[in-house]
Amino acid sequence: MDPSRPAPVLRLSGVSRVHGRGAAEVHALRRVDLTVHAGEFVAVMGPSGSGKSTLLTLAGGLDLPSDGQVLVEGVALGGLGRGRLADLRRRSVGYVFQDYNLIPALTAAENVALPRELDGVSGRTARREALAALDELGIGELADRFPDDMSGGQQQRVAIARALIGERRLVLADEPAGALDSATGDAVLAVLRARCDAGAAAMMVTHEASHAGWADRVVHLRDGAIASESTGRRSGGCRAAVHRPNHQGEVAR
């Protein structure tokens, strides 16, 4: 590790996750080492069952590893009590869930503002920040609409706005453009890219090579382990045996 470089925002060290016991034991992750620095956008790819979503839930403290250590801004998540872990997740980590996890009884603006209100920010300030986040995703007109009155793609963008509000140092996204058409998906990925360029760290799970093309680095998982890594379109170059997205976001063969 370069001693002149700041400590990573996210570090996974020897992380394993085992579900079940005995004959039913499943190794979802196997001794994964991974770091994500401020300003870096990392895409995680791999076949179904390779451990992508497990990696994301562990990175966000939504689950704890069976072995190894997860650190966010130098804080070991396994050493925190439930309350402190919840505080760290709310203030430092923005999480985009694949199934959105919006609260049906709250409007779009209220869903987005909720994390800031829980931080003690005034309702007026939280709403102003929420409206700005919705505008950034191109859905400001949905502010007072309830989730049941939105399409899946609109709900997805509200969920992304909620993940980005405030000073989130780490953004974790599970297929953030999966429910969107290509133009809207590119617009959302451009927002995530801009957040990284402004100093946040982001890790995104995706099946789409064109989406991974927005990243600085692409990590390929297979059978719960990192099989290979490549530099993304933003950095240029690649390592052997891994296809690199070209400047149009398509996979160069």
Image: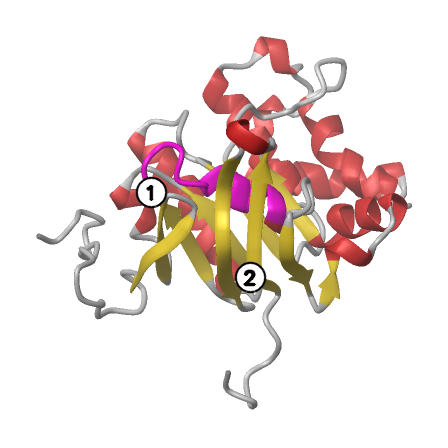
Residue nearest the observer in this picture, 252 or 115 = 252
- Taking depth in this image into account, of 96 and 205 the one nearest to the observer is 205
Instruction: Residue at 60%, 33% (x, y): give it.
Output: 21
Q: Residue furthest front?
A: 22
Residue that numbered label 2 is attached to: 14
Q: Position of residue 90 (x, y in %)?
A: 76, 46
Q: Relative to residue 218, is residue 5 drawn left or right?
A: right
Crowd band around label 1 with a 10 angstrom C-alpha radius: few (<14), some (14–19), many (20+): some
Q: Which residues are magenta?
A: 46-58
Q: Is residue 177 covered in magenta?
A: no
The amino acid type of the residue labelled 2 equals Gly
Which image quadrant for residue 141?
Answer: top right
Using a 10 Å C-alpha cutoff, classify the residue at mark 2 as few (fewer than 14 neighbours), some (14 to 19) or many (20 or more): some
Label 1, on which residue? Answer: 46
**Mark 2 or 1, nearer chain start:** 2
Give the left or right position of residue 70, taking residue 220 as reference.
right
The reply to whether residue 199 is in sight is: yes
Disc 2 and disc 1: Cα gap in Å?
Answer: 19 Å
Q: What's the residue type where badge 1 is placed?
A: Gly
